[in-house]
Amino acid sequence: MMRVYIDQTPNPNIMKFVCDETLTAGGLEISKEDAAEESLLAQELLQFPFVSKVFITANFVAVQKIDGIEWEMVADEIKEIVNRHLNEGTILLQFQKEDPFTLYVEMTPNPAVMKFVTNKLLYKGIAEAKNPEDVADFPLAKELYSFDYVKEVFVTENYISITKVQEADWNEIALELRYYLLDYLQSDKEIISENYVPLQNPYEKTFVKKDYSDVELEINDIISEYIQPAVAGDGGNIQLIEFEEETKTARMLLQGACSGCPSSTITLKNGIETMLKQMMPGKVENVEAING
């Protein structure tokens, strides 16, 4: 009985062979240099000269081929092999880990930013790298800059937001980044050093104060309760820089996916401004959004 079907991916060299049951809660990436002791399936597939890597995660097996071989020539044969190992229980010979990392990908309102969400806390705080020079005590960002299409890295709580360069296409790079990040996390490599010092935004140097006024405290409470959860869901962060009493203007710093987003400055400004006007009538009249 056939229990496997073929599913294409955005990467023309990677094909998914989806099974009718969950294979693992974690993930496994095996190349020709690996012993592949965890999977008899991977051992068999990697004997084909055109197969360069095998990925096993969730309910599918993804196979990466080299250039020069068309899937039409080999996909059905691989499908039969995956189906046989599925029936024999030899796709994976052992569980990878207790409570392993899982990772899924989310689009954000910013077309240049993709969000990679895990099932575990990565960092309590905010760590970001705007360029390859901003990687001191930030090992994950340093590794990600080995990809020439990575422009910025933003990590907080349980997700990683990656900003790509304009020329790159998410359809071609998202799957590669996902597998790379999953392998990095499952290998227990250091994400952010305990010596990490957050980047000092130039606006923060100018505006952020140690002591907030009563109005600023009230604005902060509203942001924390009503706005930040939604912004975090889109892979970004927002915080109050200052409130100017004379003009009744609140200045907000946008970070992560929010920074540089074509729509976020207008959308967030209007949404926050409307909310603050309604909840703080007569106190707040304007909101300025500043990209971090």
Image: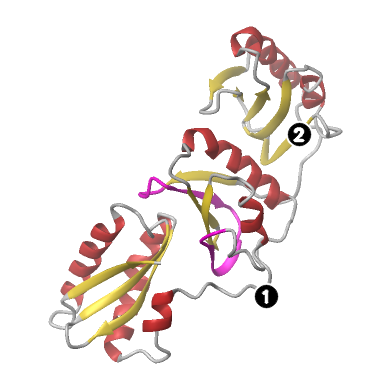
Disc assigned to residue 30: 2
At numbered mark 1, what does the secondary structure look like: helix, strand or loop? loop
- Does 219 sit above or below residue 274? below
Q: How far across and how far down the image is residue 186, in percent? A: 71, 50
- Does 157 sit above or below residue 196? above
Circle 1 is placed at which residue position?
195
- Mark found first going from the N terminus, 1 or 2: 2
Q: How far across and how far down the image is residue 47, in percent? A: 82, 19
Disc assigned to residue 8: none
Marks 1,2: beta carbons within 8 A: no
Q: On the rendered image, what quadrant is the C terminus found in?
A: bottom left
Q: Quick one: 250 or 182, which is closer to the camera? A: 250
| Residue under the point 51% across and 61% down | 130
**Around disc 2, counting alpha carbons within 10 Å, would you say few (fewer than 14), some (14 to 19), or many (20 or more)?**
many
Classify residue 219 by image quadrant: bottom left
Give, as a single range, the part of the protein colored magenta: 108-131
